[in-house]
Amino acid sequence: IDASLDGFNGVIFAYGQTGSGKTHSMMGSGDDIGIVPRMNAQLFDLLNEKKERDGCETLVTASYLEIYNEVIRDLLNPSEKQLKVREHPKLGIYVENLAELVVEEAGGIARLLDQGNKVKQVAATQMNERSSRSHS
């Protein structure tokens, strides 16, 4: 989180067999908070500290996509439209037409994750009755 506030990009990638705990590790369940909600809370705590200390205003935006069978879908603005990855000489790599929503507090991110999770591709597997079929 500290490095991202200094301008560096970061990513967390969970890899493993179906049923091995990737979703639980990332999202948690009930009172057992996962990595993503913890990072979300820490991000907004640090931004609030920075605002109080330096008077610095920060704009936070959020997007949520899934990749399923090599098709990119916007989970915050679902449609049948297939999105495309593009590269801009100054802005870098981005997903064309992907919704980018302004978020002002940690609860806003949590609500967007819940909204996006409702439209993710899921299907039963032999190991998990409701397994995510996509990468999001």
Image (tube, rainbow, N blue to C red):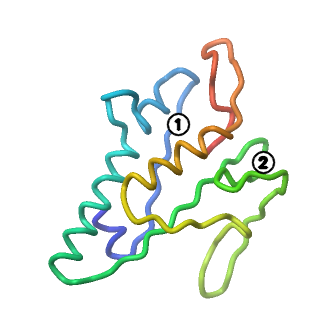
Q: Residue at x 50, y 68 (%)?
A: 102
Q: Secondary structure at mark 2?
A: loop
Q: Work out whether 113 lies above or below 29.
A: below
Q: Work out whether 83 lies above or below 73.
A: below
Q: Residue at x 60, y 82 (%)?
A: 91
Furthest residue toward top: 126
Q: Which residue is mark 1?
A: 15
Percent position of residue 13, x then y: 50, 46
In the image, which is nearer the foreground, mark 1 or mark 2? Answer: 2
Question: Relative to 68, is 2 on the left or the right?
Answer: left
Residue nearest the observer in this picture, 68 or 122: 122
Which amino acid lies under the numbered mark 1 shown in the image of this protein?
A: Tyr
Residue nearest the observer in this picture, 120 or 7: 120
Q: Which residue is mark 2?
A: 70
Percent position of residue 25, x then y: 41, 33
Which amino acid lies under the numbered mark 2 shown in the image of this protein?
A: Glu
Q: Residue at x 78, y 48 (%)?
A: 70
